[in-house]
Amino acid sequence: MFAGIAPSDRKLLWIGGGVLVFMLTASVALAPPGEQAISSVPSTYSAQSGGAAAAYALLAQMHYPVKRWENPPTELNGEAENVLLILAEPNQPPGDKERKALADFVNEGGHVLFTGADIRNYFPDADISAVPPDPVWKTFRPSIPSPLAHGARSATLQPAAYWGTLSPYQLALYGEGDATAVVSWSYGEGEILWWAGSTPLTNAGITKGDNLSFFLNAVRNWDPSAHYRIYWDEYFHGQRSSLWSYVAKTSLAWGLLQFGLLALALVFTFSRRSGPIYVPKEVSRLWPLEFVDTLGGLYERAGAASSAVAVSYKRFRALLSRQLGLPSTAPDEELARGAEQRLGWKDTGVGELLQRASAATFAAKLPPSEALDIVQELESQAARLVVRAPNRKEKS
């Protein structure tokens, strides 16, 4: 026969169901937006107008040694010789170690093609204009003859920024007046080529004017005698090569969390039904000190500290008078004198103790600390007495 669900288990099921509904709602609300929105990130994975899938596929078809780079720049150590790293508008700032790794890469002979206005986050010595330009497509002519201008009499870009003051190691290659759009920067043993925008390598801009020739000139092998490699960075676009970085972009993490909560609920339910049963320990009502504790609480609430002193005072007088063989009505002075002469209690302060106790018995308000001190001294003196029961002779 079905026994039904216990109230505690029913409550647990309601809580678990509520948590599950909350997590499902949060998964829907916090899910990343779909690809319907137009993305301006020039990623090699994006086929949208602002993406760079066409440029990457073109290099692969033309047998350029190109590959996507999804590792941190710290792993570029020792790979700077004849290597081109393309940083096309990276949108995630580097850490201190990553920034230093990029600087070391170029210093050791590596080349970097950097596009966009965020170059100062990666190479702090760059000087970018503070005022952003009008973000419309513009055509720029070569400022001086250079290998980059071979077959590329113009470059059409949508500038995100213009270069500021040029240092002795920097050379303006394309621009008009103060609007410097392309800069070649000698950096240690290597070189940084900066574009004001990524238009020449995007899906929508690679076919504009001479942009294709301009792009191919930028990724050329500057040393045909050495092995050449092109790393197109996707690490700073959020594409990380670790397993967790992939899982974090899916709903698998939420699913694992829900599975973990469900497993925890099952284990908790099973342990409650199958675990050992412990009978809680009950405090006995026959506790020996319960009466003393209750009586002390009554004295405390009533503020009758003098009554507690009176009880101990009368008990000590009764024991002392019996020990000395004196009547119970004997004055305190006589009891104190008898204790000093017959019991040898000299310099014990028995007389003073009896006077204090007598005065405290009739006190209207006695501090609890003083009452406790008097009671402890009375009980201590009473413990010294050895009172023997009187001998009773049987009648013949």
Image: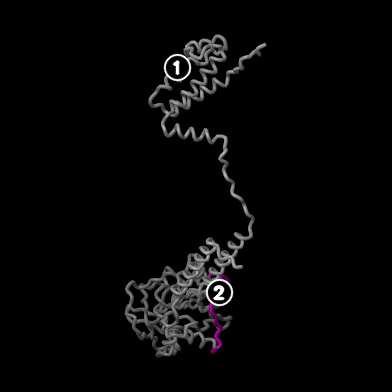
Q: Quadrant of the C terminus?
A: top right
Q: Nearer the viewer, residue 276 or 263?
A: 276
Q: Which residue is mark 2?
A: 241
Find residue 92 and report its horizontal and vertical position in percent.
45, 71
Q: Amino acid at mark 1?
A: Gln
Find residue 274 and report its horizontal and vertical position in percent.
64, 60
Crowding near pointer 2: few (<14 within 10 Å), some, many (20+)?
some
Residue 355's label in the rendered image is 1
Q: Nearer the viewer, residue 281 or 245?
A: 281
Q: Nearer the viewer, residue 165 or 102?
A: 102
Rounded to the nearest angstrom, the CA distance separating label 1 from label 2 is: 91 Å
What colouring does the structure picture have?
one colour
Relative to residue 153, is residue 169 depicted above or below?
Answer: above
In the rendered picture of this protein, how many numbered marks are placed on residues? Answer: 2
Whether residue 72 can be seen here: no
Which of the 4 image quarters holds residue 139?
bottom left
Q: Amino acid at mark 2?
A: Ser
Q: Residue at x 58, y 61 (%)?
A: 268
Relative to residue 379, is residue 169 depicted above or below?
Answer: below
Q: Is tag 1's residue or tag 2's residue first in the polypeptide sequence?
A: 2
Q: Quadrant of the N terminus?
A: bottom right
Q: Residue at x 57, y 37 (%)?
A: 287
Q: Is residue 285 magenta?
A: no
Q: Residue at x 41, y 83 (%)?
A: 199
Q: Residue at x 53, y 71 (%)?
A: 253
Residue range in magenta is 61-79
